[in-house]
Image: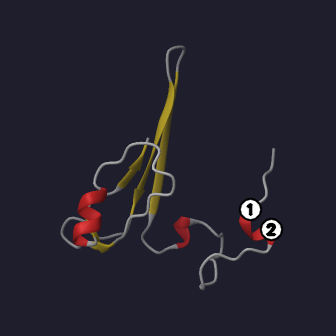
Amino acid sequence: MERNRIRDFGIVPGRLETGKRNKITDVPGVKVGHCTVKTEENHTGITVIVPGADNAFAQKYTAAAYVHNGFGKSAGLVQVEELGTLETPIALT
């Protein structure tokens, strides 16, 4: 099933042009990896975003946090809000 994207409805988020593939990996240095575990007992996975080519702990990235609906759990957002930097990859589970 193919779903419409927000741009299909004439809504253009942001002010900048999209990248060549309109993906997060269009940003130089950003890497994305994922792993899915599917067994009889489990169906889960993880996606990890490495924010750039540098060591994020040594060369911190400017960051901000936004919680859309408040449902779910997060770790590390307080540090991002207080310091305004990102020091680790982003993991979504």
- Say what amino acid the circle numbered 1 marks: Arg
Q: Nearer the viewer, residue 60 or 32?
A: 60
Q: Position of residue 78 (x, y in %)?
A: 26, 59
Residue 55 appears in the figure: no
| Vertical placement of residue 36 versus 89, above or below | above
Specify the farthest residue to the left: 58
Secondary structure under badge 1?
A: loop
Q: Position of residue 26 (x, y in %)?
A: 55, 71
Taking the image as shown, residue 26 lies to the left or right of residue 53, namely right
Q: What residue is pinned by disc 1? A: 5
> Which quadrant of the structure image shows residue 67?
bottom left
| Vertical placement of residue 75 versus 31, above or below | above
Label 2 environment density (alpha carbons within 10 Å; few <14, some 14–19, many ≥20): few
Taking the image as shown, residue 14 lies to the left or right of residue 89, namely right
> Which quadrant of the structure image shows residue 21?
bottom right
Q: Position of residue 85 (x, y in %)?
A: 27, 70
Specify the farthest residue to the top: 40
Q: Residue at x 28, y 54 (%)?
A: 76
Q: What residue is pinned by disc 2? A: 8
